[in-house]
Amino acid sequence: MPIVTIDSWPMPEERKPELIKKITEVFTGFGMPAQAVTVVIHEEKLENWGSGGEQHSVKFKDLEKKS
């Protein structure tokens, strides 16, 4: 059954259960049993991401202070 992998910046711990629940609900909406859905969250520091030639820890420095 489905395994959903999320590559993300660090997120608050209290948001993860909601994310997992909502991703699972997408699949249950297609008739799959919730227990068959696996969600894996991989978090990377902003300094390990980049786009447009710029490191995200620089590009999104205001976000890093909030997490």
Image (tube, rainbow, N blue to C red):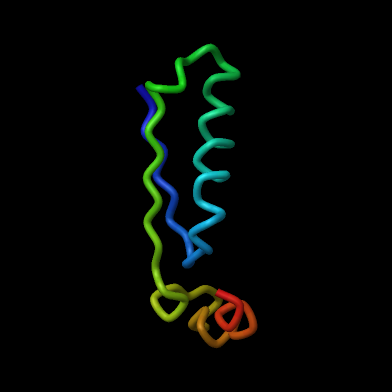
The structure residue drawn at horizontal position 51% and vertical position 30%, both measured from the top left corner, is 24
The structure residue drawn at horizontal position 39% and vertical position 76%, both measured from the top left corner, is 48
Give the answer, above or below, for where 43 lies relative to 59: above
Q: Give the number of callouts.
A: 0
Query: Residue 19 occupies which quadrant of the picture?
Result: top right
Instruction: Report the residue that reaches farthest toward the top.
Output: 31
Q: Position of residue 64 (x, y in %)?
A: 55, 80
Q: Position of residue 59 (x, y in %)?
A: 59, 83
The structure residue drawn at horizontal position 56% and vertical position 54%, both measured from the top left corner, is 15
Q: Position of residue 33 (x, y in %)?
A: 45, 16
- Does residue 17 appear to the left or right of 43 in the view shown? right
Give the answer, above or below, for where 6 lies relative to 65: above
Query: Residue 43 occupies which quadrant of the picture?
Result: bottom left
Instruction: Report the residue that reaches farthest toward the front.
Output: 14
**Quadrant the C terminus occupies:** bottom right
Q: Position of residue 1 (x, y in %)?
A: 35, 22
- Does residue 5 appear to the left or right of 24 in the view shown? left
